[in-house]
Amino acid sequence: MSSELYRIDGVLWDGGFTPKPYCPKHRLEMDAYSLAEGDPTEYEYDHLRCEECSEDYIIPRDIHEEQKYINRKLKSRELKDIKILNLDDEAIPIAEDKATSKNKKYFVKAILTESKIGQRLVVYAGERGKKEKTQIFIEPAIKRLAFDQKDIHPSDVFVKLEATFEDGTLNSIEGLKPNKKS
């Protein structure tokens, strides 16, 4: 038995090669059973019973399909946090970082990718919980700086930009909010 149990479809499962069902109340391994409708000699295994409390747990698949589903569900959980290198497209993520404002109202996320034309830095920023955001694209190899015009303008998010250059020089630009027209 694995050291962790997982609650899936109302039943506890161990994460072994062939997952085993356990009663959520007693942690006792359960057996699958069910008589198929019509033919008393044919069994469908879509019920689980705890011998301690005699409670039945109905699972949405027969026991073998449910075990296969449990294995797939656990594997997807493992894969959830793994970075994806997309070799079919041209941009491969090589670094990522994110930050939030002190009051947690705003976010900024930077993703550095490698593509056929070189490195590209994409900066996403905006107010947390809102769909609107700004996207800034920096492509040093082709000396391009751009933003996605279908999103909000960077000056609607940033009031100061700070840059550290290769030689260690630090520069900042403040007062980026445009003047309101009356």
Image: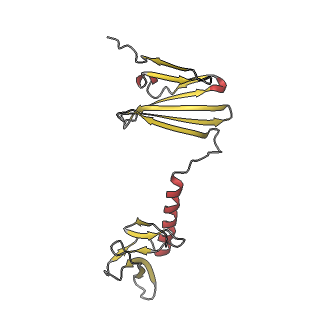
Residue at far front of view: 168
Residue 25 rendering spot, x and y as whole percentages: 33, 73
Relative to the observer, which residue lies in front, 170 or 156?
170
In this view, 103 is above or below 162: below
Residue 54 rendering spot, x and y as whole percentages: 32, 81
Q: Quadrant of residue 175?
A: top left
Residue at far right of view: 116
Q: Residue at x 39, y 32 (%)?
A: 101
Q: Quadrant of residue 22?
A: bottom left
Residue at far top of view: 182
Q: In the image, is 10 to the left or to the right of 14?
A: left
Residue 38 rendering spot, x and y as whole percentages: 40, 84
Q: Residue at x 46, y 85 (%)?
A: 42
Relative to the observer, which residue lies in front, 117 or 25?
25
Residue 166 rendering spot, x and y as whole percentages: 62, 25
Report the colour scheme: secondary structure
Q: Residue at x 41, y 26 (%)?
A: 157
